Amino acid sequence: MINYNLFPFQYAHESKKVVSRSSPPVNSQPGVVLFGSKGPYNFLHGIDLSKSLLYTPLIFNPLGRDSDPNTHRLSPEYYVGLTSIKVNGKMVAFNKALLAIDDQSGSGGTRISTLVPYTKLQSSIYKAFTLAFLKEAASSAFNLTTTKPVKPFRVCYPVGAVKTTQMGPAVPLIELVLDRQDVVWKMFGSNSMVRVTKKSVDLWCLGFVDGGIDGPSIIIGGLQLEDNLLQIDLQSKKLGFSSSILSKGTKCADYKFPTRNV
């Protein structure tokens, strides 16, 4: 299980202000939740991660769960404007219309959730995405061959066949391109792969699952949020994100709380 309940995003909705969150992997040291702060966010080695955040608009689904059209209450579910997905720098081909929120049903779009452990992709997106990942993982750069998968995953590799790096398993980079081409959420192996160990099985599995055809087209889940700094700013209606802070040589547990003079 993933430690995805450290901070439900609904708290940001209730506070009406700014909430920042950095969640560690499961069975790890504690992460951090900050209310009302836009920085600095000081981590190990004097790194201020507020300077590394990229920003994208928050989108509110008027037909989302817990919305109330009679009182104009917006759903506390937060969406972002994903425009494309890349695997190893190559665009994944799928129906981009699925990335928009349907005005009539409220379905579609890309939602962020701390309540699901792994990112869910609409069935047709999932199929295209996994095929793209399989192709790139089998290329000469990685030379990975799949083995029998373990549910709920469909793409798995023997642990011994996958090299380990500072950013986790050495697998193709996944990029979520948001409202602009230079606003990209990067997901390295630490945020894309799940270690599955039971009995004689020891695998790295692609931590994305088939989300079916109803509801949001994409729900970004807990694994993909680990060791990422996220800033929910309801005042400015934007999301700040860091991608994996492992790339900065730090992690969520390394946050340095400010000292107060007594």
Image: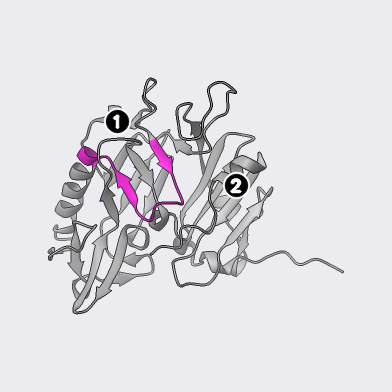
Is 63 or 86 nearer to us in this picture?
63
In this rendering, would 45 be left or right of 188? right
Circle 1 or circle 2, nearest the eye: 2
**Residue 100 versus residue 53: which sits nearer the camera?**
100
Badge 2 marks a residue whose secondary structure is: helix
Q: In terms of secondary structure, where does tag 1 sit?
A: helix
**Discs 1, 2 touching: Cβ within 8 Å:** no
Residue under pointer 1: 98
In the image, residue 7 lies at what x, y percent? 55, 54
Q: Position of residue 162 (x, y in %)?
A: 23, 70
* Mark drawn on residue 11: 2
Q: Dot 1, crowdedness within 10 Å: few (<14), some or many (≥20)?
A: some
Total tally of numbered discs in the picture? 2
Q: Is residue 28 above or below residue 113?
A: below
Q: Quadrant of residue 18?
A: top right
In three-dimensional space, the C-alpha distance between marks 1 and 2, rounded to whole angstroms, equals: 28 Å
Tell me the quarter of the picture where residue 179 sits: top left
Q: Amino acid at mark 2?
A: Tyr
> At 53% across and 44% down in the image, what residue appears?
240
Residue sitting at 58 percent across and 23 percent down? 72
Up-down relation of residue 8 to residue 58 (above or below): below
Query: In terms of image quadrants, where is residue 117?
Result: bottom left
Q: Residue furthest bottom?
A: 200
Q: Amino acid at mark 1?
A: Leu
Horizontally, is 46 left or right of 80 in the view? right
* Residue 92 appearing in the image: no
Find residue 147 and report its horizontal and vertical position in percent: 12, 66
Image point (87%, 69%), residue name: 262
Tag of residue 49: none
Rendered view: 232 above or below 61: below
Give, as a single range, the part of the protein colored magenta. Answer: 110-125
Specify how the rendered protein is coloured: one colour
